[in-house]
Image (spheres, rainbow, N blue to C red):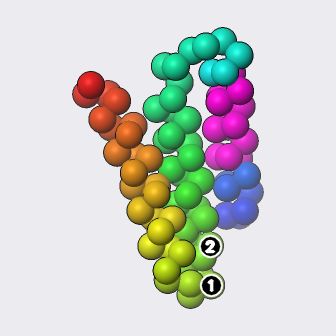
Amino acid sequence: MLKILRIIFSLIAGILAIYSLITNNNETMPIICGFLGLAFIVMGLTEWKKDKKAITILLFATAGFGFYVVVSSFFY
């Protein structure tokens, strides 16, 4: 289940990134960061199940930064 979610979130982010590159539309960047943050959370959960704490902390921190970018883009 988590593997499917990770693939879906990554594909959505990739498709939006390609769309953004083709159309020169930078307004989709916060959405891309949001989907990448969701993908990193799912990856962190899978690594947490494997008891790999160091990579789990790194993945959750990266997801947190992605969500910070999303939130800050709404207020800026």
Residue stretch rendered in magenta on the structure: 8-19
Q: Residue at x 53, y 51 (%)?
A: 38
- Do residues under tags 1 and 2 come within 8 Å of each other at their CB atoms? yes
Q: Is residue 7 above or below residue 18?
A: below
Q: Amino acid at mark 1?
A: Lys
How crowded pointer 1 is (Cα within 10 Å; few <14, some 14-19, many 20+) is rated as few
The front one of 34 and 25 is: 25
Q: Is residue 57 above or below residue 70?
A: below
Residue 25: x and y in percent read 57, 15
In the image, residue 12 above or below residue 23? below
In the rendering, at what x and y percent does residue 32 appear? Answer: 55, 35
**Residue 1 percent location from the top left of the image:** 71, 64
Residue 70 magenta-highlighted: no
Position above or below: 25 against 15: above
Q: Is residue 3 left or right of residue 29?
A: right
Residue type indicated by callout 2: Thr
The residue drawn where x is 56% and y is 70% is 45
Relative depth, front residue between 12 and 69: 69
* Residue drawn at 60 percent across, 76 percent down: 47
Q: Which mark is residue 50?
A: 1
Residue 46 bears which disc, if any? Answer: 2
Task: Residue at 65%, 30% (x, y): give it.
Answer: 17
